[in-house]
Image: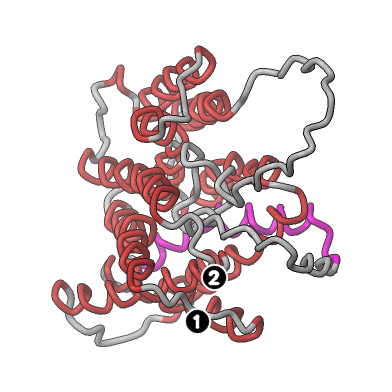
Amino acid sequence: MSAPCEPRATAPASAPPPPVPTAPSAPGTAPAPAARRPALDWRIRFAGLSLIWGFSFLLIKVGTEGYAPFQVTFGRLLAGTAVLVAAMAMRRERLPRSARTWGHLTVAALLLNALPFSLFSYAELTIPSTLAGICNATSPLWGMALSVVALSEDRPTRRRVAGLGVGFLGVLTALGAWQGFSGLDLPGTGMALLASLCYPVGWIYVRRTLAGTGSSTLALTGSQLCLATLQLAVVTPLFTTAPTSFPLLPTLSVVALGALGTGLAVLLQYGLVQEVGPTTAQMVTYFIPVIATAAGVALLGERLSWNTPVGALVVLAGAALTQSRPLRTTAPTRAPDPSPPDAAPDGLSRS
């Protein structure tokens, strides 16, 4: 599921969906008590979140060395769900009660968890973790293109269209298009790119269907992960056989991938959004492919040609352009409006 973000923003493969807006407080209710200041400085937690999500692609690669891709995804979701269920129990969060909300969460679980997690696991059977991390960085590009079509409030600007074009050139550079994609596993790369497309599709669906449910973000995300785990519990036995052994390193990788990358990362992400805002929290996205590349080369011995890091930097530059906004000119001063301002939607502006 990810740093909270607008539908056009990106999120790592291990990230959950962005926070879902909750219903505004009823008039006359007392304001919520101020949250306690976290013990760790936000910069330390920001760095930790970047490392967790950056190493997720390495953990997927190691996990698939001992287990089938669906088994990696199921174990990941199971461990991540356990962390969030524990957090929900500690905070005494209530599960959503509406059947309609559960129906939308089922679709969100497929688009934002079960499907992309499985696609990345299958992709890394044939492509290096470094390339998977770079493909994941294309989510903002997919999101910008989709939001223009699906969200009437998102209008294209020259800056955002330029960012889409720059990002597309970055993808071609990273894949070595001028060499005819020589040595590239096209099915594996295609699955990784499709996985990155799932996130903005899921975010747009969440934004359209789950705003104003009255449930907290943690309750919705925890419920969504539970549903994704159930989906994999049904699918995995149909396409795999039960493992005959549990190799230590792949097992630890899957547990860490779920508990850290899908469980703890969600809690870190939402804490950062609350403390420093979505704009700063979303910057974690741009560190993920850099860390994924460094981890794959240093720890897995993956080969790296010059076009891979260059293409990754171009992709990130394009993604940054799609997220940037021109500076606003100072509005003329006017008399204050006596009517109360509308409540701003919570969360869906960017992990």
Circle 1: residue type: Ala
Find numbered disc 2 in the image and state the secondary structure of the residue it sits on: helix
Mark 1 is surrounded, within 10 Å at the Cα level, by few (under 14), some (14 to 19) or many (20 or more) other residues, namely some
Q: Position of residue 250 (x, y in %)?
A: 41, 73
Residue at 29% x, 41% y is 189
Is residue 73 visible in the rendered image? The answer is: yes
Q: Which mark is residue 263?
A: 2
Q: Is residue 128 above or below residue 269?
A: above
- Marks 2 & 1, CB-CB < 8 Å contact: yes
Q: In this picture, which residue range is highlighted in magenta?
A: 37-63
Question: Residue lying farthest left?
Answer: 238
Q: Nearer the viewer, residue 184 or 15?
A: 15
Find numbered disc 1 in the image and state the secondary structure of the residue it sits on: helix
Residue at 18% x, 79% y is 237
Q: Which mark is residue 82?
A: 1
Q: Which mark is residue 108?
A: none
Task: Tally the marks.
Answer: 2
Circle 2: residue type: Gly
Q: Is residue 97 above or below residue 218?
A: below
Residue at 47% x, 51% y is 301
Mark 2 is surrounded, within 10 Å at the Cα level, by few (under 14), some (14 to 19) or many (20 or more) other residues, namely many
